[in-house]
Amino acid sequence: MPAKTFYLETFGCQMNAHDSEKVSGTLLEKGYTRVETPEEAGLVLYNTCSIRDKAEQKVYHRLQQFRREAGRGKIFGVLGCVAQQEGEKIFERAPHVSLVAGSASYTRLPEMLVELEAGSRRVTGLSLETEETFDTPFARRDNPHRAYITIIEGCDKSCSYCVVPFTRGPERSRSSASVLEEAARLAASGYTDLQLLGQNVNSYRDPSPAGWDFATLLARVAETPGIRRVRFTTSHPRDFVKAIVEAIDDHPVLCDHVHLPVQSGSDRVLERMQRLYTRSEYMCRIEWMKNARRSLAITTDIIVGFPGETGEDFEQTLALLDEVEYDSLFSFKYSPRPNTAAMAMADPVPEEEKTARLATLVEKQRAIQMRKNSALVGSVQEVMVEGRNQAGQWIGRTSQNRVLNFMGGSPAMGAYLPVRVMRAGPNSLAGEAT
Ligand code: SAM
Ligand code: SF4
């Protein structure tokens, strides 16, 4: 087996993607080398997602693929949400796994590596009792221009469908000084685009005496010299205050985009989901954003087929789409998750009905996006250049988080430039450098 080499595959959300950057950085710092395939690696790690059942099953499938390799000295580890949720049961289901650790234990990663290197075959990091956040100076970032910064870990809400409070533990905010120091360090090494991360960034509360709230932190990060764009995700409508929109008004560096997951347009369903807001309270936040000085793109998450969701409830979600006119949305079929309150709820929606509702929702949203994107034809948008596609166009991203592919010029990666929109599709725009 090759000495001190690792392969790391990531499933799930941006929090997981950034955790993987931190895990990679820590391993590289400990003398490991990253390789591109599990076959080449001495240590194979999967950073897992358990938000829906499908995501969880993928991991077991991966583990089965390489079962025989374990006998040849390869070490397997399961990190992240499935690790936290399933714990030591993973050792029974996949006996070739030697490490099972949830994200709240990553501060102990160096010690866990020492145990593995010493030959231990049952290493666990499953405690959720931590006050700490996994701040590491060693994060190995995957993108040279856009960087994630974690500002808060865990979640103190109890949405009745969601495993996150069980897999990521209680909320822990990072000190504002540490966040600002990381932003300044990233700017000094050439990053211009920052994304602040947390399951619920709006409930950020600076643990240091300064005691800043999220809107204050956001404004201060936006003032970092050299930073051109700042985004944040995810917001919870209950904790989304007007001061956040005011900070966006005052700081053009804060992107023209807010992701505000609604989950359902029906008050009855929102209550059963324990989301802690009503449709009209949610719409009040949308009004603040619609009245902002710049035109803000608004995106959301929606779950269809929550237990007890009637046809009438679903109609209310469709009507909400017309009312808000989201710029984009992520939609999911409800998936029952272990430990959650919704597991015990009666009146499940049949799978075929969930599939039909999802298709109706996607089709409606597609028409809204087509209409909204078409309205941008003829306008000039500033993009950050992210790469080149197979058709030979440059891939750009606007402040509103739209993909704008374009021809013309020979821009450097990470450059900002104006592009005229010539054509629109439901999911992207096409244009020419001006
Ligand atoms: N903290 C964020 C929030 O409050 O919206 C994101 C949580 S989760 C990583 C992202 C999305 O997954 C949620 O907004 C929700 O729409 C969806 N989701 C969570 N649990 C789900 C479940 N059991 N079934 C289907 N979708 C789910
Ligand atoms: Fe899950 Fe709700 Fe917390 Fe988001 S706010 S992570 S949906 S419990």
Image (spheres, rainbow, N blue to C red):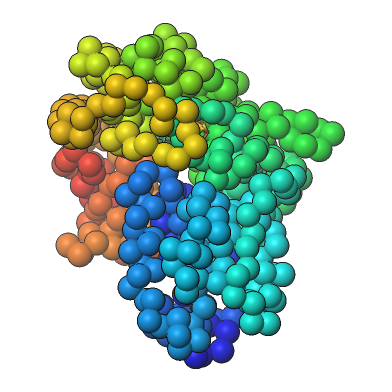
**Which one is in front, 200 or 39?**
39
- Whether residue 336 is visible, yes or no, is yes
- In the rendered image, the residue lying farthest to the right is 209
Residue at image coords 41%, 83%: 69
- In the rendered image, the residue lying farthest to the top is 280
Q: Residue 88, how many percent across, how many down?
A: 55, 59
Q: Residue 231, how many percent across, how many down?
A: 50, 40
Classify residue 313 as left or right of residue 340: left
Classify residue 243 as left or right of residue 432: right
Residue at image coords 62%, 42%: 169
**Which one is in front, 199 or 356?**
356
Residue 158 occupies quadrant: top right
- Whether residue 326 is visible, yes or no, is no
Residue at image coords 59%, 36%: 155
Residue 272 occupies quadrant: top left
Reply above or below: 204 against 418. above
Q: Residue 279, how many percent across, how many down?
A: 40, 12
**Which one is in front, 204 or 182?**
204
Residue 98 occupies quadrant: bottom right
Reply above or below: 276 against 396. above
Residue at image coords 68%, 82%: 118
